[in-house]
Image (cartoon, rainbow, N blue to C red):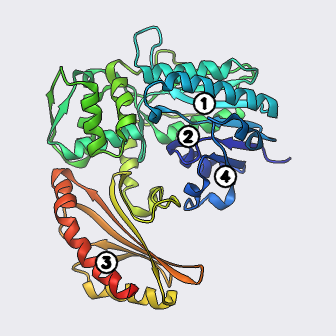
Amino acid sequence: MPKKLILVTGATGYIASRLIPQLLERGYAVRALARNPLQLRARNWSSKVEIFQGDILEPDSLAPALQDVHTAYYLVHSMAMGTGYTELETRVAGNFVHAAEMAGVQHIIYLGGLADQDQPISPHLLSRIKTGDALREGKIPVTEFRASVIVGSGSISFEMIRFMTELFPIIPSHVWLKNRAQPIAVQNIMDYLLLALEKWDKTGRVIEIGGPEVITYQDLMLRYAHARGHRRSFLFLPAIPVWFMAFGVGLVTPVPRRIARPLVRGMSHDSIVTHKSMDEVYPEVKPMDFESAVGQALAHLHPLKIEPVWADGEHHDRTLRHEGFFIDHREFTVNAEPEKVFNVITEFGESFGPQRFVVDTLEPDHFLLLRSQRSLPGEGWLEWRVSRAENQTRLTQTFFFAPRGMAGFLYWYLLYPFHLLEIMRVVRTITI
């Protein structure tokens, strides 16, 4: 029997990047849709999938990607577009359904947001619900999952909690932090999305999903702090405007300000499961408690376990915050054989000795990952990769630092630049 062909939209996004490898493990043929396919080139699964360039904002680009597809995952949003994204999202969802019908797609799986639509809710969550409504206006059965805070390394909600809690001993807060959520582990999200491929209602259904606990947003941060060994308290500022909170979140976390604003506003009400059909429809899923989900996320705090979003084919030098790390990435071209370049790098690592770095991972003539042995307020790694490109040697250097508490943030912004100068002296000896 031929494998079902599965289309995953938003392939560069958080959920898609975790879903695609698990689809491949289960033997499905996968097609990935991305506006910029170059952003997928560094993913270790990119050579195993069909990659199509397309944009849900441009309906004509969808037809080739949807051809021969059995099930399509709709995993996109338009929050970064700013004001007016609710109308935009419903319109593009309608365009997607029309294109899917023309291509003969049999099933759409959509991951939306969790809120009680009978109560006043934020524009962001209202948009997520209306997107589901727009998808169901077509003839294709839609399985819609509605989820609250997703706990996992890389989730924008979790990264917002992580960076804010790490940085501030006293966390400036809105009274909305006293509202309730029902956090769900990212692996449970994967469980539901994968089960829906084979176990679905031919007329479609909406299923609210969540973990086993209902917790205030404040307690989510306190529990994360406990897992990291921090003591945290809160300074509630009832009159703090949403735009100012979003500006602060965008300044100190990986979440861009335009996305932070609807997320912050989304905390203005509870986000909990009110219709518990998930246990009846998918009894196979065993929801993970919050502490276990946080433990899994913290276990990913290693350079080889995170998505290499910095290798996006557009930026050669980048500094970013990603999955619990500050990351400094630089690329160089060297007029020397790769073996000679790699030997110099290896000698650099050895010259510092075990007091400075220790080898974490080594692939001869290609890859060296050193772990810092310095006494730092966090954990640091230095990665070197050497490859051949267009008759020249390409050298990439990436420094990863996972801060622990405010001291970790101060180190990165005040002291790391001096350490970088020391490392760059070695690069200059190679590139000259």
Alpha carbons under labels 4 and 1: distance apart: 19 Å
Which image quarter: residue 134? top right
Q: Nearer the viewer, residue 299 or 233?
A: 233
Sequence-earlier tag: 3 or 2: 2
Instruction: Kindly indicate whether the residue at mark 1 contacts the one at mark 4 (C-beta within 8 angstroms).
Output: no
Alpha carbons under labels 2 and 4: distance apart: 13 Å
Q: Is residue 170 left or right of residue 349?
A: left
Alpha carbons under labels 4 and 3: distance apart: 35 Å
On the image, the x and y values in percent for residue 61 come to 71, 41
Which image quarter: residue 398? bottom left
Sequence-earlier tag: 1 or 3: 1
Residue wearing tag 3:
358
Q: Amino acid at mark 1?
A: Tyr
The residue under the point 42% across, 90% down is 343
The residue under the point 43% across, 28% down is 148
Looking at the rendered structure, which numbered label has been put on residue 101?
Answer: none
On the image, the x and y values in percent for residue 293 come to 40, 42
Q: Amino acid at mark 3?
A: Val
Q: Is residue 333 left or right of residue 168?
A: right
Sequence-earlier tag: 4 or 3: 4
Residue wearing tag 4:
24
